[in-house]
Image (cartoon, rainbow, N blue to C red):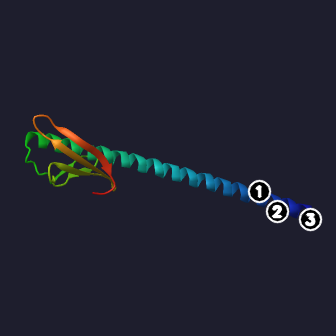
Amino acid sequence: MKGFIALMTVLIIFGIVLIIGLSVSMLSVNEATMGLKKTQSSRAYYLANLCAEHSLMRLKENSNYSGNEIIQTEEGNCQILSIENNWIVKVIGNFQNQIKKIKIIISQVNPQMIIQSWQEVADF
């Protein structure tokens, strides 16, 4: 009888240790996944800023610049949408299906560019 109780105690302790180990492993996997998503999101944001800067340079060169460009890089791509009324620039950065969108409102292009607002948006 004492052997049976000892065996059951060992099995219960082993089960508890196994559950704790699996929980810690799952937490580690979730942390790694969240870290990867954060990195991908940051890269999408940097790509969106790349397109934003590119569109502003093109707009400065030609105030009739209309947008509608896709810029491909080794990291991903970004898209400049059509420039809207009075220089509203909308860009989308995409890195491994992480999307970031930036909207820029420009009040003056020449002789000096004046940016009224530059903000990341959830949707246009």
Q: Of helix, strand and loop, which one carries label 1?
A: helix
Work out how far the residue at label 3 is from the one at label 2, CA to CA, in angstroms: 11 Å
Residue nearest the observer in this picture, 122 or 117: 117
User: Which amino acid, by three-letter code, is at mark 1?
Assistant: Ile
Q: What's the mark number on residue 95?
A: none
Mark 2 or mark 1: name the one nearer the start of the chain. Answer: 2
At label 2, counting other C-alpha atoms closer than 10 Å, the crowd grade (few under 14, some 14-19, many 20 or more) is: few
Residue 42 quadrant: top left
Residue nearest the observer in this picture, 81 or 30: 81
Look at the numbered discs 3 and 2 and tell me whether their residues touch, using CB distance below 8 Å.
Answer: no
Q: Relative to residue 98, is residue 42 depicted above or below? A: above
Please report the residue visible at 30 percent of the width from the left and 43 percent of the height from the top. Answer: 46
Please report the residue visible at 62 percent of the width from the left and 56 percent of the height from the top. Answer: 22
At label 3, counting other C-alpha atoms closer than 10 Å, the crowd grade (few under 14, some 14-19, many 20 or more) is: few
User: Which amino acid, by three-letter code, is at mark 3?
Assistant: Met
Camera-nearest label, 1 or 3: 1
Q: Of helix, strand and loop, which one carries label 2?
A: helix
Mark 1 or mark 3: name the one nearer the start of the chain. Answer: 3
Tell me, yes or no, if residue 96 can be seen here. Answer: no
Q: What's the mark number on residue 13?
A: 1
Residue under numbered circle 2? 8
Residue under numbered circle 3? 1
